[in-house]
Image: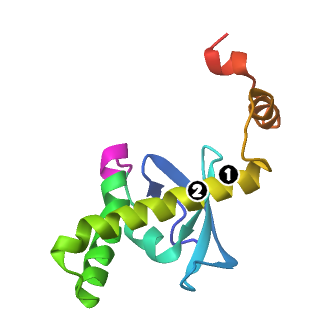
Amino acid sequence: MSEYEGKYLGSSKIAVAKLVEEKTPLGAAIVDVETEDKKRRLVPEEMLKRIATEKPVDASEFRDMRVKPVCEKIMDILAECDIAISDWEYVSQIIKGSINMSWEKAEEIMWNTSEKTFLDLDRVLRKKDIGFREILGE
């Protein structure tokens, strides 16, 4: 996907962008993006079209670029479903709870335990040749 190579994701320049077979939960295309600083992330193609820029942008602007389309879709869904404004707090609590439960389950699966220890943390960091001392700057 050469149309994205040379553009920026925030302050990072895109080196390689490849379409992957995996799809989003709603069936949209996903792009594997690697930046020149060797960081990789999967980005839905529709979002990548909105956030890939010709020039670098700061973290705050980049965050706004990613969040604004999400807010627009949420507002559209609330209107399409005719949700009462007085129910918004209830809806947002359910969303937050669902995200938290999903995150906890994903962490449990990733870490293979619900109780993480410092030894677990150290083992994960060492797989990337990072230790506690490097993080602390020693």
Q: Can residue 51 be seen in this view?
A: no
Q: Does the magenta stretch include residue 95?
A: no
66 on left or right of 81: right
**Which numbered disc covers residue 103?**
2
Q: Name the residue under label 1.
A: 107
Could you tell me how far apart the alpha carbons at marks 2 and 1 are, in whole angstroms? 6 Å
Quarter of the image holding residue 15?
bottom right
Mark 1 secondary-structure assignment: helix
Give the image location of residue 126, x and y in percent: 81, 31
Say what amino acid the circle numbered 1 marks. Answer: Glu
Q: Which of 38 and 68 is in front in this view?
A: 68
Mark 2 secondary-structure assignment: helix
Give the image location of residue 13, x and y in percent: 51, 51
Q: Which of 119 and 18 is in front in this view?
A: 119
**What residue range appears in magenta?**
56-62
Q: Is residue 80 visible?
A: yes
Quarter of the image holding residue 120?
top right
**Residue at (56, 59) in percent of width and height:** 101
Q: Does the magenta stretch include residue 59?
A: yes
Give the image location of residue 132, x and y in percent: 71, 20
Q: Which of 50 and 127 is in front in this view?
A: 127
Q: What is the crowding at mark 1: few (fewer than 14 residues within 10 Å), some, or many (at least 20)? A: some
Q: What is the crowding at mark 2: few (fewer than 14 residues within 10 Å), some, or many (at least 20)? A: few
